[in-house]
Amino acid sequence: MSEVRFHRELYAGAALERAIELLRSHAEITRTDDGDHVVVRIESPKAGRAQRVARELGNFALGLTIQSRGGAAAVGTR
Amino acid sequence: MSELAGMPSDQVDADVSARAVTITIDDSLYPLDAVYGASYTFLDRCYVLLDRAAPNRTRITLTPKKDGASEAELRSWVGELQNELLSCAWRGQIVRENRAVIEAVALQAISGAMGPPSLDDLKDFDFSEEPFEDPLGIGLSWEEKYKKKQDEAAPAAAAAAPEGTTGEGGAQ
């Protein structure tokens, strides 16, 4: 099992939800709240799959958060 | 986690065995938009995770997607990320400082793309507005600026000239 903690100030809630939906077909994903963080647990019977999905989930959530802010992506990308 | 040689230990931690590097930055130096912008450039080659290390400190963890990243590679990513952070923060400040100019230029470009004003637009245009102050006469045409002086100068010159030299048939 892999666990990723997403801070609410840094990740948009809608972006995280969207990322979870996108990757739900690859592993079993559960989401819980823990103070300032959203804790996502990923489980898969395949070896190494949970960790890979957890890392991809982090990138998806970050990318979608940046996209949702619009201006940040424009400033930060060339 | 251990420190990378030559990197500040309070900002950079590297776990070479787990192939990950963590950079902790001060939010007062790098705003969140800069963090997002710099992180975005690493999404194609790294797994990027952001977290709060403290109330005003953000932690960025980079884990390479491909196997076998060396310490030298981790070090180059740290340097690249720090450069990108600085670049994004600086560009963000330039945008903030020049927002009015950028908006004015964009507005002019958009209004120019809409084509020349129609007759109806000109009919509705308010020409009663006070003209801007122009004490040096920069907005005047050459004729407007010097015509009056010429008019004043002409009779004076005629009066000063000796009789018989001003007409076409004057003595040569």
Image (cartoon, coloured by chain):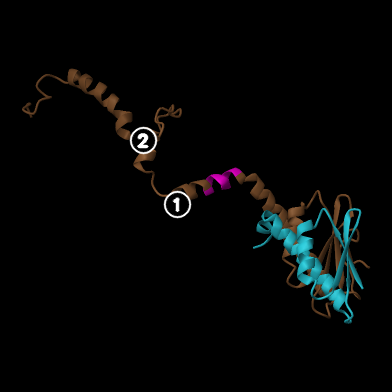
Chain colours: A cyan, B brown
Above or below: residue B125 compared with residue B82: above
Q: Which amino acid is tagged 1? A: Ala
Q: Kindly identify which chain the residue marked by label 2 belongs to.
A: B
Asked if the stretch drawn in magenta spans residue A69, the answer is no
Q: Which amino acid is tagged 2? A: Lys
Name the foreground residue: B11 vs B37.
B37
Q: Earlier in the sequence, mark 1 or mark 2?
A: 1
Image side of residue B134 versus residue B27, left or right: left
Where's residue B94, x and y in %?
Answer: 65, 49
Instruction: Report the residue at 86% width, 50% height from top.
Output: B56
Marker disc for residue B123: 2
Q: Residues within 10 Å of mark 2 (few under 14, many from 20)?
A: few
Name the mark nearer the viewer: 1 or 2.
Answer: 2
For the view shown, which residue lies furthest in the right direction? Answer: B1
Above or below: residue B43 compared with residue B147: below
Image side of residue B75 versus residue B89, left or right: right
* Residue located beneath label 1 in the image: B113
Residues shaded magenta: B100-106
Q: Is residue B83 visible?
A: no
Where's residue A19, x and y in %?
Answer: 77, 66
